[in-house]
Amino acid sequence: MTFDITTGLIVLFVLVFLAAAAVYNNIKNNNRLRNHIKSSWGKVPDIKYKPGDMESIAKFYNNLSKKEKDRFYIDNITWNDLDMDKIFTRINNTCSSPGEEFLYYLLRTPNFTANELNEKEKLMDFFDKNVTIREKIQFLLSKIGKSRNLIPLQ
């Protein structure tokens, strides 16, 4: 009987220890992520792209451009002549795969209407002035992460 109680206590202790270690690691990782968000704001991103990454990022645009045939877009020849992949990598400070894909889409389909430009200006001004909200949103988006080469939704 004492062997069963001792074994049970040991198992319980190990489980409590593992749970505490998991909570500690989660808190540590979240703090590291928050510090990274704060320190990287406004800086040139240091993202290493592998062969095929740009093709994966472009999938959202490619799928949408087939459906939005009447929308203005930058064609591949112009995109390559302007070396827009390099510009994309220079400004891509997004926190998630959907963010990367949408940034790429925005660069490929520029919209110059006064309404949209004013709305973008308001959003930039809002996030510039509301650091806490911006960092919370970046934190949540960072939890999504960046996963390239996923199968796109049809």
Image (cartoon, rainbow, N blue to C red):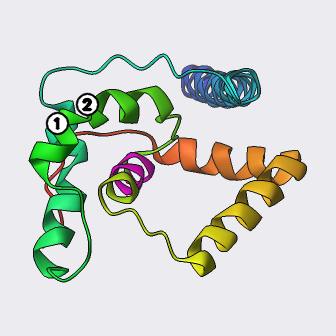
Q: Which amino acid does label 1 sit on?
A: Asn
Residue 53 in the magenta stretch? The answer is: no
User: Which image quadrant: the N terminus?
Assistant: top right
> Which image quadrant is residue 5 in?
top right
- Residue 100: tell me if it is visible: yes
Residue at image coords 67%, 72%: 119
Residue at image coords 38%, 32%: 87
Say whether residue 130 is left or right of residue 149.
right
* Image coords of residue 84 (percent x, y): 29, 36
- Helix, strand or loop at disc 1? helix
* Image coords of residue 146 (percent x, y): 38, 39
Q: Which amino acid does label 2 sit on?
A: Asp
Residue at image coords 76%, 50%: 134
Q: Give the range drawn in magenta.
A: 98-104
* Image coords of residue 7 (percent x, y): 55, 22
Label pair 1/2, CB-CB below 8 angstroms? yes
Residue 80, which numbered label? 1
Residue 100 in the magenta stretch? The answer is: yes
Residue 41, which numbered label? none
Label 2 Cα crowd, 10 Å radius (few <14 / some 14-19 / many 20+): few
Nearest the eye: 48 or 147: 48
- Residue 149: tell me if it is visible: no
Residue 83, which numbered label? 2
Q: Height in image: 16 above or below 143?
A: above
Label 1 Cα crowd, 10 Å radius (few <14 / some 14-19 / many 20+): few
> Which image quadrant is residue 9 in?
top right
- Helix, strand or loop at disc 2? loop
Q: What's the distance in space between the residues labelled 1 and 2, CA to CA?
A: 5 Å
Nearest the eye: 104 or 77: 77
